[in-house]
Image: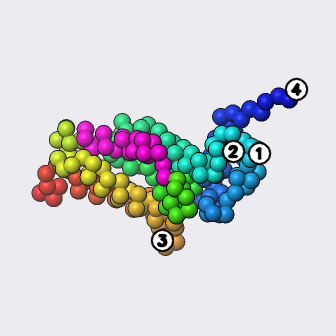
Amino acid sequence: MARPIVHDHLVQQRLLAVTAELVDREGPARVTLRDVAAAANTSTTAVYSLFGGKAQLLRAAVDEGFRSFGASQQEAAPDGLRGLGRAYRAWALEHPALYRLMFGGALAAYVDCSPTPEVASGSMLPLLEAVTQGQEAGRLRRDDPATVAMTIWGQVHGLVSLELAQVDNHGTDWGGIYEAALEGVARAWTQGDPYA
């Protein structure tokens, strides 16, 4: 009697990580399940068993990215908006393939594999909570919290995306630029006139 093949959590995590790397390097249309399985040192049976197929594997990789990102944001939440901003950049620089997979848009053109809405929105909850807390404490303007959070997100996202795309002159101080942007964001949303 043959032993059943067990595809454990480690195999699943390896498949998700390899998928992000391969899609980032090759593009979603060129990556096959055979490529993913080989790079993860497993079989295509493992992919089908754990995910069902390519579209489900891609969605799972995107969801895993948002979960990981969300966990880093949750960990940084006690440090306020600046802490969240710094954690955003640190996570993106540590996981560039996942970041591009989540936000690059390449998958949308290939297959419907947008992230699970609850997973994606949950990853940004620490930012929304920090904005709301800042408003309740009288530190931030009382504009719509979701608008404030999305505006802040757009600022940090744009800079991180430029940095990852290497849109710069040699020697660009991305860390310094990013800190200046965080300072500008803080001033822009401070309660009252920051220039008074």
How many labels were placed on the picture?
4
Residue at numbered disc 3: 168
Question: Do tag 1 and tag 4 residues touch (Cβ < 8 Å)?
Answer: no
> Label 2 vs label 1: CA separation?
7 Å
131 drawn magenta = yes
Whether residue 104 is visible, yes or no, is: no
Residue at numbered disc 2: 47
- Tell me which label, 2 or 3, sits earlier in the chain: 2
Residue 146 drawn above or below residue 111: above
90 drawn magenta = no
Could you say whether the residue bearing mark 3 is in a helix, strand or loop? loop
Q: Is residue 192 left or right of residue 42?
A: left
Q: Residue 51: horizontal and vertical position, in percent?
A: 63, 43
Q: Residue at horizontal 23%, vertical 56%?
A: 188
Tell me the kind of residue under disc 1.
Answer: Ser
Could you say whether the residue bearing mark 2 is in a helix, strand or loop? helix
Q: Residue at horizontal 30%, vertical 50%?
A: 149
Q: Residue 58: horizontal and vertical position, in percent?
A: 58, 51
Q: Locate the C terminus and report the quarter of the image it occupies.
A: bottom left
Mark 2 Cα shell of 10 Å, populated few (<14), some (14-19), many (≥20): many
| Magenta extent | 114-133
Question: Do tag 2 and tag 1 residues touch (Cβ < 8 Å)?
Answer: yes
- Tell me which label, 3 or 1, sits earlier in the chain: 1
- Tell me which label, 1 or 4, sits earlier in the chain: 4
> Label 3 vs label 1: CA separation?
41 Å
Residue at numbered disc 1: 43
Q: Nearer the viewer, mark 4 or mark 2?
A: 4
Q: Which mark is residue 1?
A: 4
